[in-house]
Amino acid sequence: MVNISLVPLALVAGLAAFGEARNCSPGLNYCGHVLLSIGKYFPDIADELARAQKSKCLGKSHVTDAIYYCSGNNGEIRYQKWCKNGCKNGGAGKNDHC
């Protein structure tokens, strides 16, 4: 007989995988808002803006409407530029753009 208290635990464990963060795809450009939607990228974005000497640009649009290049299999990103008129999602497998 299945212990009733284990059923909810198994259900939660199974659903946890759906909320798991994923990495960007190497070689593609991503809008900041897209990176934030696919994973826990805010610390990486803040670190990259500091590295690129853009740390004063931590306002919402500078985080969400900047282009970042995905440079590695572990989700590493590199700041490219800020999109003055907003950043557009290019779709799955395609570069995002200003």
Image: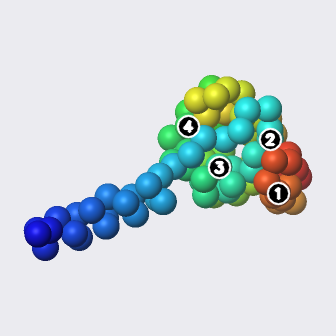
Helix, strand or loop at label 2? It is: strand
Categorize mark 3 by other alpha carbons within 10 Å: few (<14), some (14-19), many (20+). Answer: many
Residue 13 is situated, as x and y percent measured from the top left of the image, at: 32, 58
The residue lying toward the viewer, choosing from 35 and 6, is 6
Establish if 60 lies above or below 42.
Answer: below
- As measured in the structure, the alpha-carbon distance from the residue carrying label 4 to the one carrying label 2 is 15 Å
Q: Which of pointers 1 and 2 lies earlier in the amino acid sequence? A: 2
Establish if 27 lies above or below 1.
Answer: above
Q: Which of pointers 4 and 3 lies earlier in the amino acid sequence? A: 3
Q: Are marks 4 and 3 in contact (CB under 8 Å)?
A: yes
Q: Are marks 1 and 4 in contact (CB under 8 Å)?
A: no
Q: Which residue is mark 4?
A: 44
Left or right position of 95 against 77: right
Q: Which residue is mark 1?
A: 91
Which label belongs to residue 57?
A: none
Tell me which residue sits at (44%, 55%) in the image.
Answer: 17
Tell me which residue sits at (79%, 54%) in the image.
Answer: 92
Tell me which residue sits at (22%, 64%) in the image.
Answer: 9
